Amino acid sequence: MSVEMVKEDEYLVEYNSGTQNVRFDGTIRLRTTDEYAPITALLNKAHDSVSATETVCLDFSQLRFLNSSGINAISRFVISARKQAKINLKVIGNQEIYWQQKSLKNLKRLWNDVEIAII
C-alpha cells in the first residue's frame, strides 16, 4: 500500500492504493487544464492501478470548493473511465456543501454506472 499526493497551500488530493480511494480536501481554484495536470495524473494512476471490476472511490466530502475548470477535469476523468469500462467508480460528496449536491450528481449523466453518495 502506498499513499501519493498532490499538495498545495489550499488543497490536498491524496490517493491511497490500499483502499483505491482518492480524497480531496480544501479549496481548489486552478485555472487551466495544465494546472490540473498533476491531479489528473493522480486520478489516472488510481484508475490504472486497480484490476478489472474493482472500485475507485473519489471522496469529495472535505472539498469546500472546486471551480468549473476542476469540475471539467473530473468530468473528463469520468468520461475516460467510462470509455475504458475497466473499473467501477464511486463518488462521495457532502450534502452540506452546496456545489457538491449539484455538480457531483451530474457525473451520473456522463456515466450512468457511477455510484453517487451525497451523505
Image (tube, grey):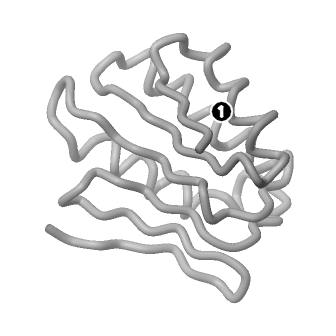
The image shows a total of numbered marks equal to 1
Which residue is rendered at x = 82% and y = 65% of the image? Answer: 29
Q: Vertically, is 14 above or below 57?
A: below
Q: Nearer the viewer, residue 17 or 60?
A: 60
Q: Vertically, is 12 above or below 87?
A: below
Q: Nearer the viewer, residue 66 or 36?
A: 66
Q: Where is mark 1, residue-wise?
A: 75
- Assign the N terminus to one quadrant of the image: bottom left
Which residue is rendered at x = 30% and y = 27% of the image? Answer: 87
Q: Quadrant of residue 14?
A: bottom left
- Assign the C terminus to one quadrant of the image: top right
Q: Position of residue 51 (x, y in %)?
A: 15, 34
**Counting other residues with Cα less than 10 Å from the Cα at mark 1, is it few (<14), some (14-19), or many (20 or more)?**
some
Which residue is rendered at x = 40% and y = 44% of the image? Answer: 57
Q: Amino acid at mark 1?
A: Ser
Q: Position of residue 38 (x, y in %)?
A: 55, 64
Q: Quadrant of residue 112?
A: top right
Compared across the picture, whether 103 is left or right of 105 comes to right
Q: Nearer the viewer, residue 14 or 77?
A: 14
